[in-house]
Image (cartoon, rainbow, N blue to C red):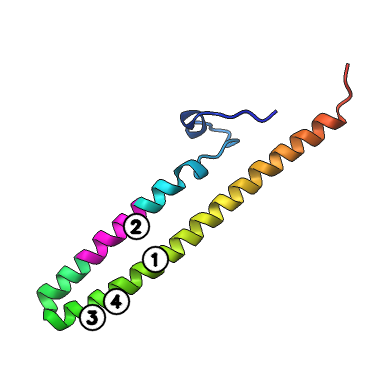
């Protein structure tokens, strides 16, 4: 039947019968947001340095909007990934139970 494996067992499962996406998706989301914030800060800094206050203000507004859109798109993408993985896990459980019911006992 369905066996719960540890993180490292799932990570090195070369048959890909176990999924690690639901366990790491939160970390990926946070790392992505932190990276996007650092990127946006760099863009604003470069705009202030080379474009002056007007360029810095315009890039600040653009970066805030871009970060908001990035957060929405990355969150929806990661939620879709988790939904697909959970669907696959639940389908496997249902299939194993159906096979177990059809198999005649000794």
Q: Which mark is residue 33?
A: 2
Q: Is mark 4 on a helix, strand or loop?
A: helix
Label 1: how many Cα within 10 Å (few below 14, some 14–19, many 20+):
some
Give yes or no for contact between labels 1 and 2 (Cβ–Cβ under 8 Å). yes
Of the image marks 1 and 2, the number of the one nearer the N terminus: 2
Q: Residue at x 39, y 46 (%)?
A: 27
Marks 2 and 3 close (CB-CB < 8 Å): no
Residues under numbered marks 4 and 2 in contact, where contact means CB atoms less than 8 Å apart: no
Give the position of the C terminus as an image quadrant.
top right
For image coordinates 34% across by 67% down, the residue present is 67
Asked if labels 4 and 3 touch by Cβ distance under 8 angstroms, the answer is yes
Cα distance, mark 3 to mark 4? 6 Å
| Residue 22 spot, x, y in % from top left | 51, 44
Q: Write down the residue under mark 3.
A: 58
Secondary structure state at the residue bearing disc 1: helix
Q: Earlier in the sequence, mark 4 or mark 2?
A: 2
Within the image, what quadrant is residue 95 found in?
Answer: top right
Q: In this view, does 89 lie to the left or right of 36?
A: right
Upstream in the sequence, badge 1 or badge 4?
4
Q: How many labels does the image show?
A: 4
2 or 3: tag closer to the N-terminus: 2
Q: In this view, does 3 lie above or below 44?
A: above
What residue is pinned by disc 1? 70
């Amino acid at each position: 039947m369905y066996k719960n494996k540890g993180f490292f067992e799932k990570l090195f499962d070369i048959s890909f019968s176990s999924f690690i996406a639901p366990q790491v998706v939160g970390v990926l989301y946070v790392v992505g947001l932190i990276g996007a914030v650092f990127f946006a800060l760099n863009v604003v800094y470069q705009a202030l340095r080379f474009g002056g206050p007007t360029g810095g203000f315009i890039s600040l507004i653009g970066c805030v909007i871009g970060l908001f859109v990035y957060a929405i798109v990355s969150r929806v993408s990661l939620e879709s990934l988790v939904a697909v993985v959970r669907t696959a896990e639940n389908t496997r459980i249902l299939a194993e139970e159906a096979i177990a019911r059809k198999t005649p006992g000794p």
